Image (spheres, rainbow, N blue to C red):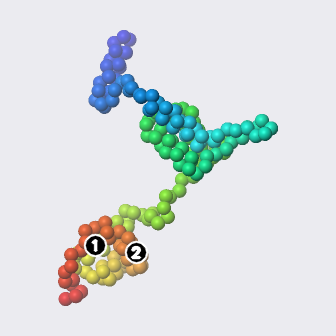
Amino acid sequence: MGRARHGAMKAARLSLLRSGRSALQLVSPEQLEARKRDVRLSIDLLFGIETWDRHGMPQHAFLSADAENQARAALCRLLRSGRVPDEVLNLLGWVFDPNGQGDLKAVLKRRNRRRSRHPDRDYEITRFVDRLRRDGRSYEDATTQVADALRKSEEHIKKIYGKHRSDFDPIPRQRRKSDR
């Protein structure tokens, strides 16, 4: 039993040495205070701030928009640190639980409606048009050919190409096949 324990400790030490991390991480008082602040903000974000009304009954108040953004940043720092207190994890679980009992419910939504739902497809369409243009096709011919091949409207292909063509090198000016 003693050898097994010693072997496990040795393996853990070797693992720490390979990963480049220290077994003991020294934390400055400022870092400790910042972590405590992040934990407090995260709890306030996920649970609300408990206050009492004039009758002495508990109630929850939620953060303002600015304070909520600061609390979201604090929660992100905690989650990325890999050392999240159990209380924060439990509150986060309640928020994401579809049958949760708390006041908050997580709703995931897209950041920007202008972004494509199919960025990979749009990139390939742009690349297809760009390749045809480099082969000497005119803008109209290239977009028409891609639209026909993909069974999309020419306007749709032109819109996608116009939005993403700056991701590619500019097409050098030359005589195109349609101009000859």
- Tell me the amino acid under the disc marked 2: Lys
Disc 1 from disc 2: Cα separation = 14 Å
Q: At x 55% / y 40%, what residue is drawn?
A: 42
| 82 shown above or below 146 | above
Placement of the C terminus among the 4 image quadrants: bottom left
Q: Identify which residue, 55 or 22, lies in the foreground.
A: 55
Q: At x 39% / y 63%, what residue is drawn?
A: 119
Q: Which image quadrant for residue 178?
A: bottom left
Residue 33 at x, y = what percent? 49, 32
Residue behind mark 2: 159
Placement of the N terminus among the 4 image quadrants: top left
User: What kind of element bears circle 1?
Assistant: helix
Residue behind mark 1: 130
Q: At x 56% / y 50%, what residue is drawn?
A: 66
> How many residues crowd mark 1 within 10 Å: few (<14), some (14–19), many (20+)?
many
- Tell me the amino acid under the disc marked 1: Asp
Residue 31 at x, y = what percent? 44, 32
Left or right, 58 with respect to 130, comes to right
